[in-house]
């Protein structure tokens, strides 16, 4: 990760504005996050000789002679919004533990709610855990829950009307990964478990049938029997993932009021990211999001997945 020495001391919105007082300062920071001091031509990939034009707002490549901006090829590309507003939005999402609604953000940075909504969804997208994460290991709790909808259906394993099933895995003293699933059954959940968890790991779950036979594929499978009001049995419990579910639900119902099925994963990503960076300072979290926004994401990729 690129180190941003000057903004590790940011502790408040005021500090943020002092550190990046102008559009130019934001642009320089984004360039640093993106290229680490050595601009690369967006058109031909050359970094041999790049010079600034238009008073520093644009770059020009000496090889292909084409101009480009630091925003090109990132999620900021099509946005006419000043980077200063983006930086503020990043700060709010970094510093507010429960998240920010589009209504609140629109007031805070003076944009329309629609604009705020798009900004938040782009930032959430960037918060997604990178795809090539190493497998989870040690003791890993697995559990599923249902989010949204007004119907309080009974039973597990099948879709409850209006509700979205979310499956999660929590590495003890480590990270959490969660995603929505079409069905909370073994056929759906086991491939996700195999894909994310090392076969040397110990699985910890409740007695739900979808997790049956995991002991044959993993080092061990320990079970806590919730239906008998048992919540901890030696190392068998699901307290970490359940703690995450309660933060997620409080967040979705309290701040966002509701979440459509279509957008559940974006909220899950946001809460997962915040949980997994819980030991970081707000400034470190801000830097991490900025790095992700400027590097691995292209606007084309973003809209194709939306
Ligand atoms: Zn070029």
Image (tube, grey):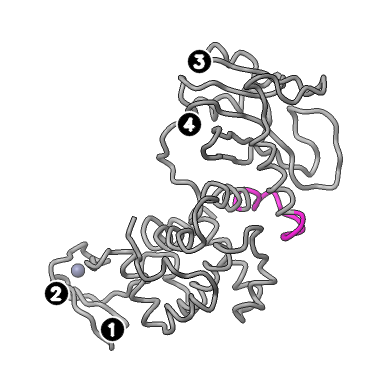
N-term mark: 1 or 3: 1
Quadrant of the rendering where the N terminus is positioned? bottom left
N-term mark: 1 or 2: 1
* Residue 136 - label: 4
Q: Residue at left 62%, top 63%? A: 96
Identify residue for label 1.
56
Describe the element under mark 3 as helix, strand or loop. loop
Give the class, few, some or many, for how many residues have Cα within 10 Å of label 3's Cα (few <14, many ≥20).
Answer: some
Describe the element under mark 4 as helix, strand or loop. loop
| 84 on left or right of 272 | left
Q: Is mark 4 within 8 Å of ligand 1?
A: no
Image coordinates for residue 208, horizontal then vertical, percent: 72, 21
| 78 on left or right of 188 | left
Measure how far apart labels 2 and 4 are at the Cα level: 46 Å
Measure how far apart labels 1 and 2 are at the Cα level: 16 Å
Identify residue for label 3.
219
Give the class, few, some or many, for how many residues have Cα within 10 Å of label 2's Cα (few <14, many ≥20).
Answer: some
The answer to which image quadrant residue 223 occupies is: top right
- How many numbered markers are drawn? 4
Image coordinates for residue 305, horizontal then vertical, percent: 51, 52
Measure how far apart labels 3 and 2 are at the Cα level: 57 Å
Q: Residue at left 49%, top 54%? A: 280
Magenta span contains residue 265:
yes
The answer to whether marks 4 and 3 mark residues whose Cβ atoms lie closer than 8 Å is no
Q: Is mark 2 within 8 Å of ligand 1?
A: yes
Please state the quadrant of the image where ligand 1 appears.
bottom left
Q: Nearer the viewer, residue 130 or 202?
A: 202
């Amino acid at each position: 990760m690129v180190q941003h020495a000057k903004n590790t001391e940011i502790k408040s919105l005021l500090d943020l504005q002092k550190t990046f007082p102008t559009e130019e300062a934001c642009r320089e920071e984004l360039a640093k996050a993106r290229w680490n001091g050595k601009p690369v031509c967006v058109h031909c990939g050359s970094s041999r000789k790049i010079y600034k034009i238009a008073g520093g707002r644009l770059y020009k490549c000496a090889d292909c002679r084409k101009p480009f901006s630091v925003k090109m090829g990132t999620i900021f590309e099509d946005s006419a919004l000043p980077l200063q507003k983006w930086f503020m939005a990043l700060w709010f999402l970094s510093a507010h533990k429960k998240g920010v609604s589009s209504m609140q953000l629109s007031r805070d940075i003076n944009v329309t709610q629609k604009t705020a909504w798009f900004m938040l969804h782009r930032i959430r997208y960037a918060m997604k855990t990178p795809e090539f994460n190493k497998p989870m290991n040690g003791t890993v709790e697995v559990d599923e829950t249902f989010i949204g909808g007004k119907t309080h259906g009974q039973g597990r394993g099948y879709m409850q009307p209006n509700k979205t099933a979310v499956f999660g895995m929590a590495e003890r003293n480590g990270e959490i990964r969660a995603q929505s699933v079409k069905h909370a059954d073994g056929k759906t959940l086991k491939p996700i478990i195999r894909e994310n968890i090392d076969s040397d790991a110990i699985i910890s779950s409740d007695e739900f049938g979808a997790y049956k036979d995991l002991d044959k594929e993993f080092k061990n499978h320990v079970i806590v029997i919730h239906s008998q009001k048992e919540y901890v049995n030696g190392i068998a419990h699901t307290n970490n993932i359940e703690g995450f579910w309660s933060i997620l639900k409080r967040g979705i119902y309290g701040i966002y009021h509701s979440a459509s099925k279509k957008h559940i994963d974006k909220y899950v990503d946001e809460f997962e990211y915040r949980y997994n960076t819980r030991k970081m300072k707000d400034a470190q979290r801000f830097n991490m999001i900025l790095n992700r926004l400027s590097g691995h994401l292209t606007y084309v990729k973003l809209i194709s997945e939306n």
